[in-house]
Amino acid sequence: VQLQASGGGLVPPGGSLRLSCITSANSFSLHTMGWYRQAPGRERVLVADSTYGGTTNYADSVKGRFTISRDNDKNTVNLEMEDLKPEDTAVYYCHVQRYGIDYWGQGTQVTVSS
């Protein structure tokens, strides 16, 4: 399974970004699609994910600011990020789980700084 993420960048605090990830696998085979992030010196943690049936899950730190959306027809998962804060700075990784196996994208840098 190949994952291609895009959309990272540098934004000031309070700004917005949209991350996108397209996968080579058919969405029907992907139990979850989502995003993790890893800040320097810290472990990789879940940001948000979505099941094939549409159930979403968010980290407490991003609830109300980030929105995950999954397009099963296009095999994509997007992350709309609003009101970004410096603590959101991290490398963001697209993630899918297919038949119990985890697959990761290459990571895209998000930097929130004035």
Image (spheres, rainbow, N blue to C red):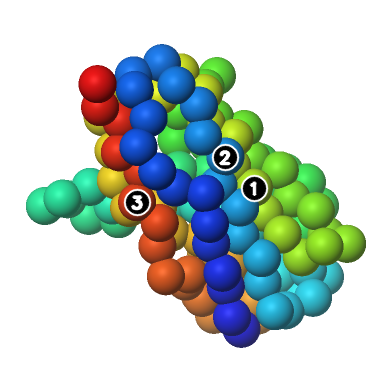
The residue furthest bottom is 1
Read off the residue under disc 3. Answer: 109
- Indicate the position of residue 28 as horizontal and vertical percent values: 82, 70
Figure check: 109 above or below 30: above
Q: Are marks 1 and 2 in contact (CB under 8 Å)?
A: yes
- The relative height of residue 69 versus residue 11 in the rendered view (above or below) is below
Query: Is residue 72 in view from this perspective?
Result: yes
Secondary-structure class at tag 2: strand
Label 1 vs label 2, nearer the camera? 2
**Could you classify mark 1 by the number of other residues whose Cα lies within 10 Å: few (under 14), some (14-19), or many (20 or more)?**
many
What is the quadrant of residue 2 in the picture? bottom right
Element class at badge 1: strand
Q: Which quadrant of the view contains residue 72? A: bottom right
Q: Real-space Cα distance between discs 1 and 2? A: 7 Å
Amino acid on which disc 1 is placed: Asn
Q: Is residue 72 left or right of residue 15?
A: right
The quadrant holding residue 18 is top right
* Residue at the (15%, 50%) spot, across then down: 40
- Relative to residue 42, is residue 103 depicted above or below? below
